[in-house]
Image: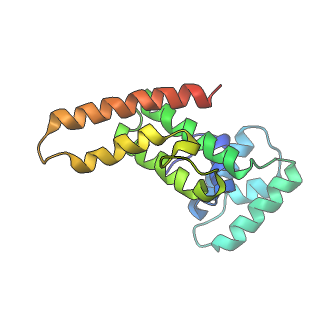
Amino acid sequence: MTLNSVEEGLAMLALGTLSSEEIPELALLLLSAGVDSSELAALAGSLKIDHPADLRNELDQALRRAGTRMPGRLSAAHTLKRLLADRAVQGLLSPRAAASSIIDVFQVVERELPPGGFVGESFGIATLVGLYYSYDDVRLGDEQSIREIDEGIAQECQKLAAASGA
């Protein structure tokens, strides 16, 4: 995956979903955003052979020294939901891929959310979840039903991108 912003990278880091391969990329994004840190510069140039635990520790230390605040887990999850929905709106992600990724984010924080009546309700994605799992009921070759589900997910992504950005 390619990180698109510091916001995305910090959100993924807060949720524990940032891979060690993405740490140098996040360090470079932070430097490009004006965070001045020799530790970040070293991380930006780190190699794949560096131990992942060492990279994470160095990143945590560099962020603390630079005064960069990490988002809380729920805030990070809502940020990623908004960013993923926005990518679908922009056509950078297919509706199905966006829905799958948003559901993945929800599953990371599901236990931290208040219970809802429907799966995803407390995260604001109950309709999206229902639409996504309706792909399972489509008969093989039923392209019309797939398009309808895609359109429904695209509409939900528009709502999520707009609501989360408010």
Position of residue 148 in the picture relative to residue 13 (left or right) = left
Q: Horizontal and vertical percent for residue 144? A: 17, 32
Image x and y of residue 38, in percent = 82, 54
In the displayed structure image, the side of residue 2 where residue 72 appears, left or right: right
What residue is at 52 percent from the left and 31 percent from the top? 160
Q: Position of residue 53 (x, y in %)?
A: 68, 72
**162 up-or-down from 36: above or below:** above
| Residue 36, quarter of the rendered image | top right
Residue 2 image offset from top left, x and y in percent: 52, 48
Does residue 166 lie above or below 112 as drawn?
A: above
Answer left or right for 61 relative to 92: right
> Across the whole image, how many numbered discs are drawn on residues?
0
Image quarter in which the C terminus is found: top right
| Residue farthest along the left direction in this orientation | 141
Colour mapping used in the image: rainbow
Residue at the outermost front position: 117
- Can residue 1 be seen here? The reply is yes
- Asked whether 45 or 96 is in front, the reply is 96
Residue at the spot x=32%, y=29% of the render? 151
Q: Residue, x 50% and y 40% (percent of image)?
A: 125
Tell which of 130 and 70 is nearer to you: 130
From this viewpoint, is residue 94 visible? no
Q: Residue at x 87, y 48 (%)?
A: 67
As rendered, which of 77 and 67 lies closer to the eye?
A: 77
Say above or below: 95 vs 117.
above
